[in-house]
Image (cartoon, coloured by chain):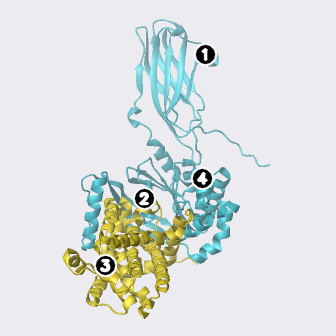
């Protein structure tokens, strides 16, 4: 393995068994086969087994940060556990160059009856620190955890924040070469969180390779150099983190409905025979325009035109208004004409959406037109949230 | 500054059997050597945790065997059970026997529960699971020392002087330790996969104690005599005891066979444990 490579995965797969009883049975069989010097034939699926992680390969150089994203149950935690050596792969090979530290449920090894001080030593030993190392870092750990005099109190009386702070402090002070982080910063107050970020940044500067699992796309996009998106145990690789984040967002969109829903095109008196949409893919801030060509045999005075935007990342209506909201009166007159409807500068960021247009006769006594047009709003790199707003930076 | 920095770890299926038997033992040996301090810390953790919220704390180690011994004295006095012919004061005989027996029984129960008890930790942190099993034995070692101390007081009380072999006692109990550890390794694995094992052992241990001449002298006839002849625990408990009390023993042949058995059980179980530990983690 190359000196600069910290982590290498070669077609790594891991299987699980859906049935507990069967899993017990398989376990005994596998162990027996190994004792007899036979292979446990790990590459084959038996009844009730499935691949939780399948064919994942990547290489991480020293100091790189990999973001791992994916919906629940996609195999993120299993992947981390394999990197940590807790579970072994059933297929493929993992090579790890250096000491692995994990920020996965910190404080897991704490015993509630022991004091903070005692737990630092026990937990430190479990995390593969030597006695000298802990002695040397003890003061620093206590300071980082910021628990002061409570260090000699049994941890069962600690607040949950103190508990996690102490756990985190021990874990980061074992100075790993490879750091695994699983949704860590959902804990602690903001002050402690920023302290953690700084510590992680410090480790990164020292050349620590990091694998970061999070549902927080902001964290992934700002911290990672690369990303993998897991779905049903399979990985997609992105050298650009933002592309990975966008790919992940798309999981939650049903792409089946991408056809325009032409629900109503007119009645006996009026026909909308041609509708032109300026485009279907937008960057935040761009305008949507529909040009509706119609032929009518009567005058429709003061119609009401509804426009609305539904986005996939918001269960509620993103936007809706009628022309009344703008104090505009629109009439569709006899003959062949065109009506242009423009929604200006839509700031939607990184979402799939539908734009709905419906036209009603005066006083909403009859509906003349109703279309729903699926569109995509691209995400802007290094930005999160449902909207992308103009921000100015002025240096004086 | 960092250790293991140049060492590359690889994880792949059937990793262990690809490496071959002998290099496996080297790996195991290195792991144990590196984790001495961890073993001590894990032992300390268990020890502190048990006695911190208890008034008489460590003294429980004496009370439980004393109750067993008291029961036997009572049964003997009332003529229900015959303890057999003894040349030494019964309490000394019983305490020495119980001390060694407890080392095995309590150690085995603790060992077989060690992985399951630490289950939540095992699935979150990668550390030496062998250390966990070994550390679980510490508790019964402490009990052993206390009971041994109690035997010393009894020697003084009865004015009975032990033979010089008492100085060798730490070495004489080594085979029991190996057997306990070996069984503990394999039972912790089995218990990790099937919780039934833990229950079976707890029930079986009480029964096994009555089958083994720990609190009574070796039976000379009947089915118990037959069982005793093939019970390695009998030799491992009674030979060291005989040596201390009288300076000689009539069971040397059985003792050496039992020592050999213990040694191979230990080696085999350690090997099985090494092969099985990651699989158990998935199933715990």
Residue at screen point 47% across, 18% down:
A293
Task: Quadrant for the C terminus of chain B, please.
Answer: bottom left
Chain in cyan colour? A
Please give the residue where the numbered disc 4 appears in the rendered image. Answer: A160
Left or right, A31 with respect to B116, comes to left
Residue B64: quadrant of the picture? bottom left
Q: CA distance from mark 3 to mark 1?
A: 95 Å
Q: Which mark is residue B46?
A: none
Residue B11 pos. (x, y %): 39, 69
Please report, as a chain letter, where disc 2 is located.
Answer: A
Which numbered mark, 3 or 2, is in the foreground of this view? 3
Q: Chain of mark 4?
A: A
Q: Position of residue B242 (x, y in %)?
A: 35, 87
Q: Do badges 3 and 1 share one subunit?
A: no
Disc assigned to residue A79: 2
Q: Tell me if mark 1 has few (under 14), some (14-19) or many (20+) residues whose alpha carbon lies within 10 angstroms of its own.
A: some
């Amino acid at each position: 393995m190359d000196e600069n490579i910290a982590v290498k995965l070669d077609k790594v797969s891991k299987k699980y068994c859906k049935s507990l009883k069967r899993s017990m049975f398989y376990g005994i069989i596998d162990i027996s086969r190994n004792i007899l010097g036979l292979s446990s034939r790990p590459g084959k699926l038996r009844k009730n087994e499935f691949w939780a992680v399948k064919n994942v390969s990547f290489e991480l150089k020293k100091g790189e940060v990999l973001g791992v994203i994916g919906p629940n149950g996609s195999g993120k935690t299993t992947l981390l556990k394999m990197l940590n050596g807790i579970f072994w792969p059933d297929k493929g090979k993992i090579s790890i160059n250096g000491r692995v530290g994990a920020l996965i449920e910190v404080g897991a090894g704490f015993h509630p009856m022991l004091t903070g001080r005692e737990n630092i030593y026990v937990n430190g030993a479990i995390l593969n620190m030597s006695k000298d190392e802990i002695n040397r870092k003890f003061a620093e750990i206590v300071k980082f955890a910021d628990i002061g005099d409570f260090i000699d109190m049994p941890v069962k009386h600690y607040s949950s924040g103190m508990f996690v702070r102490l756990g985190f402090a021990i874990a980061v002070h074992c100075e790993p070469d490879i750091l695994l982080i699983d949704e860590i910063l959902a804990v602690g107050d903001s002050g402690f969180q920023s302290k953690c970020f700084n510590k992680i940044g410090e480790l990164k500067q020292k050349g620590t390779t990091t694998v970061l699992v999070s549902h927080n796309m902001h964290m992934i996009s700002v911290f990672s150099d690369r990303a993998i998106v897991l779905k049903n145990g399979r990985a997609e690789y992105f050298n650009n983190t933002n592309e990975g984040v966008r790919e992940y967002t798309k999981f939650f969109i049903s792409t089946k409905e991408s056809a325009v829903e032409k629900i109503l095109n007119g009645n006996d008196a009026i026909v909308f025979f041609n509708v032109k949409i300026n485009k279907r893919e937008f960057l935040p801030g761009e305008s949507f325009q529909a040009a509706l060509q119609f032929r009518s045999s009567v005058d429709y005075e003061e119609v009401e035109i509804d426009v609305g935007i539904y986005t996939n990342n918001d269960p509620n209506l993103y936007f809706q208004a009628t022309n009344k909201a703008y104090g505009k009166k629109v009439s569709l007159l006899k003959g062949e004409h065109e009506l242009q409807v423009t929604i200006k500068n839509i700031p939607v960021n990184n979402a799939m959406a539908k734009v709905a247009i419906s036209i009603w006769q005066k006083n909403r006594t009859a509906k003349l037109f109703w279309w729903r047009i699926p569109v995509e709003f691209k995400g802007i790199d290094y930005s999160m949230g449902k909207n992308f707003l103009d921000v100015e930076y002025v240096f004086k | 500054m960092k250790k293991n920095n140049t060492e590359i770890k690889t994880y792949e299926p059937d990793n262990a059997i690809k490496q071959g038997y002998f290099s496996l033992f080297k790996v195991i040996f290195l792991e144990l050597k590196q984790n001495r301090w961890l073993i001590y810390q894990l032992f300390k953790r268990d020890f502190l945790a048990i006695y911190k919220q208890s008034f008489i704390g460590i003294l429980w180690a004496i009370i439980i065997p004393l109750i067993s011994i008291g029961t036997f004295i009572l049964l003997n006095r009332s003529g229900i059970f015959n303890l057999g012919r003894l040349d030494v004061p019964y309490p000394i005989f019983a305490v020495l026997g119980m001390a060694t027996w407890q080392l095995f029984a309590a150690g085995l129960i603790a060992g077989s529960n060690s992985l399951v008890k630490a289950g939540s930790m095992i699935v979150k942190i990668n550390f030496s699971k062998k250390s966990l099993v070994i550390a679980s034995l510490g508790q019964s070692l402490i009990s052993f020392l206390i009971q041994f101390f109690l035997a010393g007081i009894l020697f003084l009380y009865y004015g009975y002087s032990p033979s010089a072999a008492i100085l060798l006692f730490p070495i004489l109990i080594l085979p029991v330790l190996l057997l306990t550890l070996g069984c503990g390794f394999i039972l912790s694995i089995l218990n990790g996969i099937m919780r039934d094992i833990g229950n079976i052992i707890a029930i079986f241990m009480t029964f096994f104690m009555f089958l083994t001449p720990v609190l009574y002298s070796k039976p000379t006839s009947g089915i118990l005599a037959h069982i005793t002849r093939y019970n390695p625990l009998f030799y491992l408990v009674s030979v060291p005891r005989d040596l201390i009390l009288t300076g000689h023993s009539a069971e040397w042949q059985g003792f050496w066979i039992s020592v050999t058995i213990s040694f191979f059980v230990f080696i085999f179980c350690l090997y099985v444990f090494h092969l099985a530990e990651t699989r158990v983690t998935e199933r715990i």
